[in-house]
Image (tube, rainbow, N blue to C red):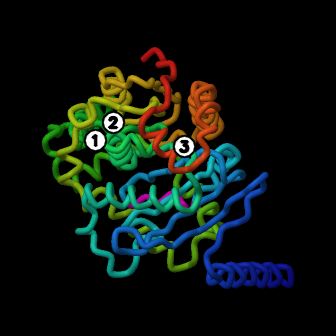
Amino acid sequence: MRALRLASLLVLALLTGGVIWKTLPARTAAVEGPDPIAELVPARIGGMTQWVLIRGADRKAPILLWLHGGPGAAQMPIHSVTAALERDFVVVHWEQRGAGKSNPPGFDPATMTFERFLSDAREVTALLRARVGEQPLIVLGHSWGTMLGARLVARWPEEYAAYIGVGQQVNTMRAVSLALDWLRDAAPESDLAAMEPAAFRDHELYVRLMQEIEAHGGGMNVALLSLLPRALAAPEYRLPDYPRWLDGANRGSGAMWPAYLQRDLIAEVPRMPVPMLLLSGAQDMNTPVPLVREWIGGVDAPLGKRLVVFDPSGHAPFLTDTARFVEAVRDFAANIAAETAGRGAQLRAIGTPDHRRTRDRSHPVPPIPASTL
């Protein structure tokens, strides 16, 4: 009995300590490196406070701007999964409007429009230029973040050195058709399998379909509960931030569903003016690989394009095959750096930041080899 009483007191003490710790001001841990940067920034973006996490071992390294999925599926509380990227990049996790710490009480989902997100992203870009520097900035989008990121980079290529799409979104309704075909094989007993694709223009039915896909191995393919200890340990989050995180994630694509139905990457982005890397999970039926192959096969990418498929990963290879994911991103950036080294050495003699910015806009990054698609 005494041992049980001591164990109970210990658990109570740990819980009390955890609650007290989570009421302390939000912060981010230091990063070790030659010239590190570790900042958690509340910034005025698009008329509201949005939070930006900036971390890297060398503040002069290329910037990697991570656009999370959802919209609303903030990445900040589990950013440590891919902390290895901080050795080679200044990694930026921006919590977009309606997500995580940027989902305040009284937030109006009506402000979640595509053009508003694009405008916010450009403000974040300006913030990073002012706060970090003029080094190359690579955009990495995941899921919804690819819908935003591909169009952001294609529209303003002078601002960005490269584009990485993880779980590249191409066309929602065509993806539904492929997901239904897959579900009919994986779970023929499902009542959804008998429905026509057009039925899933209804958002509630679409959410049910994605839940079925997840249950049968065609979704994230990672137990989200397994990420909970990491999320709870994140010093960037205080107790009130967790309900906001869950609320934004549960809102998902609902606030922007009409835009999801209208968007077609093949029609809207026929040309990618910067080097491009796409990373897909072979088991991903949320953003199916056949559609990703179709877009990358047809898009005009004069500076290079490459597709890497992770088997047996699903919609989030950075969670299920983290080491290979990090290696692929590093190799892509190293390839770009190697191609630009000679020209960069000459241009560095010009000296001033203004000259460097003009240089980047006038002379995009040279080609990288395109892989066999």
Residue 216 seen in this snapshot: no
Q: CA distance from mark 3 to mark 1?
A: 48 Å
Q: Which residues are magenta?
A: 72-77
Question: Please, is residue 372 above or below residue 13 in the view?
Answer: above
Which callout, 2 or 3, points at the residue further toward the start of the chain?
Answer: 3
Numbered circles on residues, count: 3
Which callout, 3 or 1, points at the residue further toward the start of the chain?
Answer: 3
Question: Please, is residue 223 above or below residue 38 in the view?
Answer: above
> Residue drawn at (45%, 55%), measured in percent from left and top?
125
Question: Please, is residue 106 above or below residue 285 in the view?
Answer: below
Seen from the viewer's position, the closer of residues 100 and 268 is: 268
Q: Residues within 10 Å of mark 2 (few under 14, many from 20)?
A: some
- Which residue bears the numbered disc 3? 136
The answer to whether 282 appears left or right of 150 in the picture is right
> Residue drawn at (23%, 68%), measured in percent from left and top?
110
Q: Residues within 10 Å of mark 1 (few under 14, many from 20)?
A: few
- Which residue bears the numbered disc 1? 190
Amino acid tagged 2: Ala
- Which residue bears the numbered disc 2? 187
The quarter of the displayed image where residue 177 is located: top left
Q: CA distance from mark 1 to mark 2?
A: 6 Å
